[in-house]
Image (cartoon, rainbow, N blue to C red):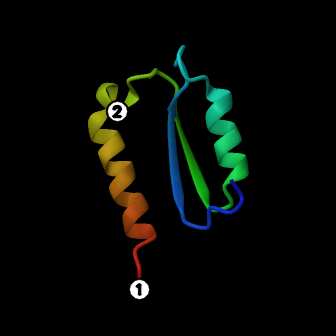
Amino acid sequence: MSKIQLPTLIITGMVDSIVHRQNALVLANGIPQSTLIEFNDAGYGVIFQRPNVIASKVIDHFKRHQAK
């Protein structure tokens, strides 16, 4: 994963019983320019449980890392 040299946004739900938090931590620790966002009250369907917040975080991520 260390070969990934692009800003990477990792989003996870803390109560996800399908894809455990540890997987997100492995990605965040392995990708140099990663940002990890964790939602304490969301699970596997975090994008459906928090769509507006997710959309805002993705837009912010793109704005921070847009090509100049």
Residue underneath mark 1: 68
Q: Amino acid at mark 2?
A: Ile
Task: Quadrant for residue 67, please give it.
Answer: bottom left
- The CA span between labels 1 and 2 is 29 Å
At which x and y percent is residue 32?
A: 68, 60
Residue in view at x 39 percent, y 50 percent: 57
At which x and y percent is residue 28?
A: 65, 47
Instruction: State if disc 2 and disc 1 touch (CB < 8 Å).
Output: no
Q: Secondary structure at mark 1?
A: loop
Residue 22 or residue 50, whichever sits in front? 22
Residue in view at x 38 percent, y 64 percent: 62
Mark sitting earlier along the chain (1/2) = 2
In the visual, does 38 lie left or right of 42? right
At which x and y percent is residue 24?
A: 61, 36
For residue 13, above or below residue 15: below
Residue in view at x 38 percent, y 59 percent: 60
Residue underneath mark 2: 47
For residue 34, above or below residue 6: above
In the visual, does 58 lie left or right of 27? left
Task: Quadrant for residue 22, please give it.
Answer: top right
Residue in view at x 70 percent, y 40 percent: 26
Q: Amino acid at mark 1?
A: Lys
For residue 6, above or below residue 35: below
Residue 25 marker: none
For residue 39, above or below residue 6: above
